[in-house]
Amino acid sequence: MHTVSKWGLVAAAVLSVAAAPNSASASQGPVSRGVQGSVDRYEVLRLTAHAEQITYLSNGNPQTGVGKQYLYINTIQLDGRPFGKEMLECTQIGGTLTSPGPHSDQCRGTFLFPDGQVTWQNGTSSPTSAPPEDIDIAITGGTDRYAGATGYGHVNLTEPGESTQTLHLWLRPEVRGQ
């Protein structure tokens, strides 16, 4: 049987869940980013995520864990109301299962909101024997209302299987044809 570090699981859980239970779009408005003729809309989403399904695949190296995967489906809330799902996958790409040395994961995910999707990715490296710190993610794109989205997010673990995440999105009207 493959042993999984509890902090590796916590790190994956931190990445899998999204942010603050009491806010929706905290901020939005036009922002010029220096592209001639382009005015982006800046939007902040504060979301809460709850793990709905977690799958651990022990398909990695039995000694190091490199190659093992964590798959998550999370329920996302905005202002305490359902707002969609998040799907994500993390793969251990470095480190070991038991040493205090760094444990490295590559993660990517998609938020499925009613008005479009937002994609993200990140890499983490944290000691196997210590809890992960807050994690930042890069917004890599989107569809529909979020087409061409860029930005970043900040994830805070609130308890196992739950977290808050603040997404800072720059939405470009010319990409969406608006």
Image: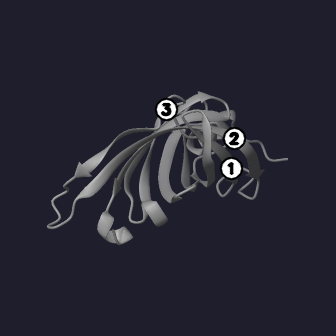
Q: Nearer the viewer, residue 44 or 177?
A: 177
Residue 19 position in % (x across, y down): 52, 36
Q: Nearer the viewer, residue 28 or 155?
A: 28
| Residue drawn at 72 percent across, 50 percent down | 63
Residue 135 position in % (x across, y down): 47, 39
Above-or-below relation of 176 to 85:
below
- Give the mark, 3 or 2, whose residue is nearer the N terminus: 2
For marks 1 and 3, give the one nearer the viewer. Answer: 1
Residue 11 position in % (x across, y down): 59, 39
Q: Nearer the viewer, residue 53 or 136?
A: 53
Above-or-below relation of 131 to 143:
above
| Residue 99 shows in this picture | no
Is 58 left, or right, of 150 in this rendering? right
Above-or-below relation of 1 to 14:
below
Placement of the C terminus among the 4 image quadrants:
bottom left
Residue named by callout 3: 133
Give the quarter of the image for residue 163.
Answer: top right
Is 95 left, or right, of 171 in this rendering? right
Above-or-below relation of 114 to 38:
above
Residue named by callout 1: 72
Spatial separation of the CA atoms under disc 1 and disc 2:
7 Å
> Furthest-bottom residue in view?
177
Q: Amino acid at mark 3?
A: Glu
- Give the mark, 1 or 3, whose residue is nearer the N terminus: 1
Q: Amino acid at mark 1?
A: Tyr
Q: Amino acid at mark 2?
A: Ala
Q: Are marks 3 and 2 in contact (CB under 8 Å)?
A: no
Residue named by callout 2: 51
Q: Are marks 1 and 2 in contact (CB under 8 Å)?
A: yes
Within 10 Å of disc 1 (Cα), the crowding (few <14, some 14-19, many 20+) is many
Residue 82 position in % (x across, y down): 63, 42
